[in-house]
Image (tube, rainbow, N blue to C red):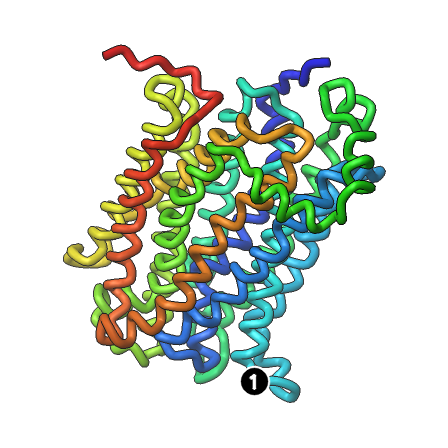
Amino acid sequence: MEKRKLSFWDIWNMSFGFLGIQMGFALQNANASRILQIFGADVEELSWFWIVAPLTGLIVQPIIGYYSDRTWTRLGRRRPYFLTGALLASMGLVLMPNADMFTAFLPALWVGAGMLMIMDASFNIAMEPFRALVADLLPSDQRTLGFSVQTVLIGIGAVIGSWLPYALTNWFGVSNNTVEGEVPLNLLLSFGIGAGALVISILITVFTTKEYSPEEMALIGINENEIEIEEEEESSLLNIFADFKKMPLTMKQLSSVQFFSWFGLFGMWVFSVPAIAHHVYGLALDDHGTLYQNAGDWVGILFGVYNAVSAVYAFFLPAIAKKIGRKMTHAISLVFGGLGLISIYFVPNENWLFLSMFGIGIAWASILAMPYAILAGSIPAKKMGVYMGIFNFFIVIPQIVNALIGGPIVKYLYGGNPIFALIISGVSLIIAAVLVVRVKDVDDKVVIVK
């Protein structure tokens, strides 16, 4: 039995939950640092608070991938996981900016950091089963389209999430004024709206997408009995370590590309607000007043711009990859992103940052689609979930490394100026671009005529 070719709208509905996931993820990325600063975190401490997010992903992802490969319920194989992740993430979105409600029990800063951990762990629970769902349902020649559609929806959701605080203040008159220790109203409302959108979008995917039954999967080539035999022969979770040792060559080669890509992205997410507020707006690092909130809202607009660029660029990725190959497409895109991050140091004012975001958006679209499109063809079909989970190691480990060393480097090497963290992030993306050229793409049919 061959996998069915799906229509564009089937693929769209299958991936629609990513819109809500990324809306919440964008709210987290653009605003978590300034919320933690409102609750009392210093700029050099920010990366340490962010470490809980990738650390939980490191633990959660392979386990979720492993068990989602072995789950058969009335809801299907992958859907129970991203539905559960969405519900937990929505809870974190509501509670993080309201962390000061719990000061009778714990300091708001620690509650906020805990909610950041819950959010990111939950996003991880939801995200990777979505990646595996594309690989489960789509034939090889539709996978680049499938991951590109996901990237489009990620971009749309991220634009909405990133722009929400600015839009509520400047279009609807919601206050962004703050007093010491309190999150402004526009952020409180934005996170609440994001939580609702996350749940609704996930439910749309759950009710419109049909997964293959166990019998159909067996006919395609995934034998359920083989899975049961593996579980009897080996201790279940220990299989993850065995699979890690046996990972395909393509996956090993992509690991270094992912390391430098996500090392750079993490630095951008953690330090963009303080870096732009200090370097571009000229504000003191300990100034968290209205002007700082304006700068933070503007960073949200900028993050929305790079996500909008990624959504548009994602439509062209399949055609570009068909013409020059997936590896070269990814390499060129990463160079654009690296130059975009480095250019932030040289802009004369905040409006020029739109140009920087253009390059970052191109890289972001490719990072969300190309590595997975390259990887999917090299993974055994019956272990798609666990290998997608293991692949997440190479997303979270660089974030953990950056979280551990990023703050001390900013404090002691950069003299407290976080703009240099963004420059290093740009250099990291360019290194990733160089490394991707050596990756073996076993599914790439492009022929380059010399």
Q: Secondary structure at mark 1?
A: loop
**Left or right: 427 in relation to 307:** left
Front position in the image: 124 or 183: 124
Q: Callout 1, which amino acid?
A: Pro
Residue 247 placement (x, y as % from top left):
55, 38
Q: Is 138 placed above or below 63 here?
A: above
Q: Is residue 199 among what the camera can see?
A: no
Residue 200 placement (x, y as % from top left):
67, 47
**Left or right: 207 in relation to 33:** right
Residue 21 placement (x, y as % from top left):
58, 48
**Few, some or many residues within 10 Å of mark 1 (<14, 14–19, 20+):** some
Residue in the image at 54% along x and 62% along y: 55
Quarter of the image for residue 407 reads: bottom left
Could you tell me which quadrant the N terminus lies in?
top right
Residue in the image at 35% along x and 53% along y: 264
Residue in the image at 27% along x and 40% along y: 336
Front position in the image: 263 or 300: 263
Residue 337 placement (x, y as % from top left):
30, 44
Could you tell me which quadrant the C terminus lies in?
top left
Q: Is 8 placed above or below 341 here?
A: above
Q: Is residue 225 among what the camera can see?
A: yes
Residue extending furthest toward the bottom: 104
Front position in the image: 105 or 412: 412
Q: Which residue is disc 1 drawn over?
A: 107
Residue in the image at 28% along x and 58% along y: 422
Q: Is 22 placed above or below 136 here?
A: below
Residue extending furthest toward the front: 233
